[in-house]
Amino acid sequence: MKPTIYDVAREAGVSIATVSKVLNNNGRISDKTREKVGRVMEELNYQPSLVASALTSRRTGTIGLMIPDIANPFFAETARGIEDYAQQQGSDLIVCSTDRDDEKAARYTSLLLRKRVDGLIIASHTGKTDMIRRLLADQVPLVLFSAEIRSLESSSVTVDDYKGGYQATEYLLSLGHRKLGIISDNLPGSKLRAEGFLDALRDAGVPFDNPANITHTSATLENGRRAAAAMLGQPEELRPTAIFACNDLLAIGVLKEARSAGLSIPRDLSVVGFDNTVLAEICHPTLTSIAQPLREMTEQAMILLNESIDNPDSPRRKIMLMPELVIRHSTGPVPGIKPEERLL
Amino acid sequence: MKPTIYDVAREAGVSIATVSKVLNNNGRISDKTREKVGRVMEELNYQPSLVASALTSRRTGTIGLMIPDIANPFFAETARGIEDYAQQQGSDLIVCSTDRDDEKAARYTSLLLRKRVDGLIIASHTGKTDMIRRLLADQVPLVLFSAEIRSLESSSVTVDDYKGGYQATEYLLSLGHRKLGIISDNLPGSKLRAEGFLDALRDAGVPFDNPANITHTSATLENGRRAAAAMLGQPEELRPTAIFACNDLLAIGVLKEARSAGLSIPRDLSVVGFDNTVLAEICHPTLTSIAQPLREMTEQAMILLNESIDNPDSPRRKIMLMPELVIRHSTGPVPGIKPEERLL
DNA sequence: AAAATTAGGTTAAGCGCTTACCCTTTCCCT
DNA sequence: AGGGAAAGGGTAAGCGCTTAACCTAATTTT
């Protein structure tokens, strides 16, 4: 049997309260006792049960992370950031892949609540607000990650998606592109990215009048390919010379399709992705992408979560961080364009 | 305050033992009582505390997963497989990224033990056996994943690394390649892969006498590049026409380096990777790779772990699964080779 | 009809900690 | 020297469950 606090107390000739105090380093304990108890702990290889301690102290030291899929690089990187931060404060992470399935999310949420996790970071909501609304009402410490819900008063950490879309588009315009395409997915953030795209065009006075050059789909490589195939299959005068994809996977699909259509990148087509995952470095040519400042985002998320854990009715805060354009080799100027025709 | 089992018992007019029994669906309870209690639980939105129940039942329903880095696609996919299986049985996963740092691993392990996880899946050991040996001695249910330790009597699930290396090499030989290179990393499994490589050459009677064509390094894209640069920089007669890299990341480094050296793949160079991660589909050309049967592996790992949890002194088992060659576009015949010169 | 089962609960003792509160000593001040 | 404060530690009541043991009434067996 694993030794308990009673065993330690007995061996050290003190009460369990004393042991508990040296364990948690509080209360008044003389150096001598502290040392003796410490020694006994070593001898017995005592591992205090955090489940017992959680029962009394109401802190489990574990936080739940809800994401669509841990096998998706963007979320794996997110998880890593949060894990590192949690680890620093002695907590750890239960990872829950929901596949954006509301029922699965509900099951997981319930499990996490029964496990009495200290808090939740949710990066997988589907837009259905009722479950989150209920959690909030129940005072469950929680922060929304990477996608917020405007109608809800919840803490959140996001990147400025609108700005990201705007930025990507501005950049493509500056390279001389005038016929642009956009492939968006069906997530909340992507809507904003698309808005940014459209507004950037409008602000530059570049018309966007070909409905075939905007596609909504879900984020897979194959869908990216298909969407690109449709756009690139148009007659030359309609076909875009640059495509903004709302995430890296879609963008890489575009890259692949372009190549098999015999186009050279970036000469014949420029492509910008979003998220700046490892994939952007892996593919060929390497992908220009809008980076989410993941490390800062995860750090902020943990800060907000901690606030909320320490004081359940501390004010909720929404934090929005700036995206950053990372230029690689999938983008280039429109061939033959004269410098003065470039924007900016 | 969250309702407890006492609240439910009081409202339902029964004892807490009864509530516990309907909760766990054991003991003898009439349908009427069961229903009434169930109704009260709903009304109160009762969420039984699994931490309290863990304290008595000695089952936390959580398992610890130790991996080098959750942001590494191979381990993220592993985690997903284990998570899915765990979820089916109502458990969940604490993910620990150790960076293959023994001290970090020790800290995490201790945390997991104090949290009284039901068992450990370890995919991150560094070859230092003492910590694992101690865990085993302490009867901690555990299974080694993806790399075993021959000297230890521990359950494990691995792919046949030797066979994988052999298979990759056989395939390259069958394409007519005779000057091969290998880039290995410093992990236990990779040694076996390299052995398989060398034995395949020996068995085919193909000499491997150029020490410059074997490199050991750690698994990063950049290291793959560097290693490839060294090999490809040799005079034509020494330079390999095919390279086997012991994991996908290294292989992709090779792809990149080859391209910037102006080589065309697979015409001028064939490349085989290992692990068959998503990256193999992302890169260009897509990567021929030795696949680990991840889904079966994670399933087996969970089966072994469960056995060990249910009966701590059930016999340990080592399971080795077969790798599979997945042919994509990074490999091809040596140019100009006649069919009869090919090995089969 | 008496004895033996069975169904359906209840009682109470933990599980291994934390913590408010209390009790001695010892020390310091005046 | 006497009194108060501080230092060091102990007591005991939970935290919210599970489960062995037990009890009573109803049902079955012979």
Image (spheres, coloured by chain):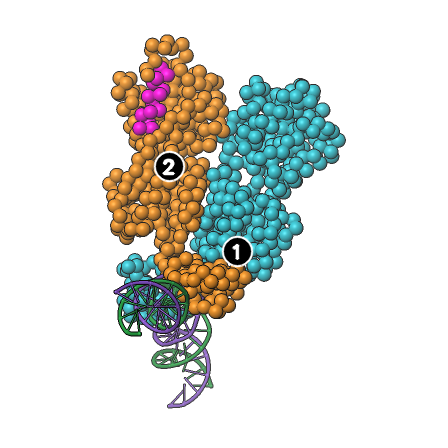
Chain colours: A cyan, B orange, C green, D purple
Q: Specify the quadrant of the image occupied by residue B210.
A: top left
Label 2 amino acid?
Glu
Amino acid type, label 1: Asn
State left or right for residue B333 relative to residue A3: right
10 Å crowding of disc 2: few (<14), some (14-19), many (20+): few
Query: Which residue was labeled with disc 1?
Result: A306
Q: Position of residue A198 (x, y in %)?
A: 70, 34
Taking the spot 28% from the left edge, 39% from the top edge, the residue there is: B318
Q: Whole-percent x and y of residue A309?
A: 53, 58
Identify the residue at horizontal 38%, vertical 40% (top origin): B298
Q: Residue at x 53, y 56 (%)?
A: A306
Residue at the disc numbered 2: B296
**Image height of A110 relative to B214, above or below:** below
Q: Residues within 10 Å of mark 1 (few under 14, many from 20)?
A: some
Is B171 part of what is drawn in magenta?
A: yes
Q: Is residue A108 above or below residue A241?
A: below
Residue A196 point in image, percent of width and height: 67, 37
- Chain assignment, label 1: A
Tell me the SS state at disc 2.
helix
The residue lying toward the viewer, choosing from B154 and B71, is B154
Residue range highlighted in magenta: B163-177
Q: Which of A196 and B144 is in front in this view?
A: B144
| Residues at marks 1 and 2, CA–CA distance in whole angstroms | 39 Å
Image quadrant containing the C terminus of chain B: top left
Picture quadrant of residue B295: top left
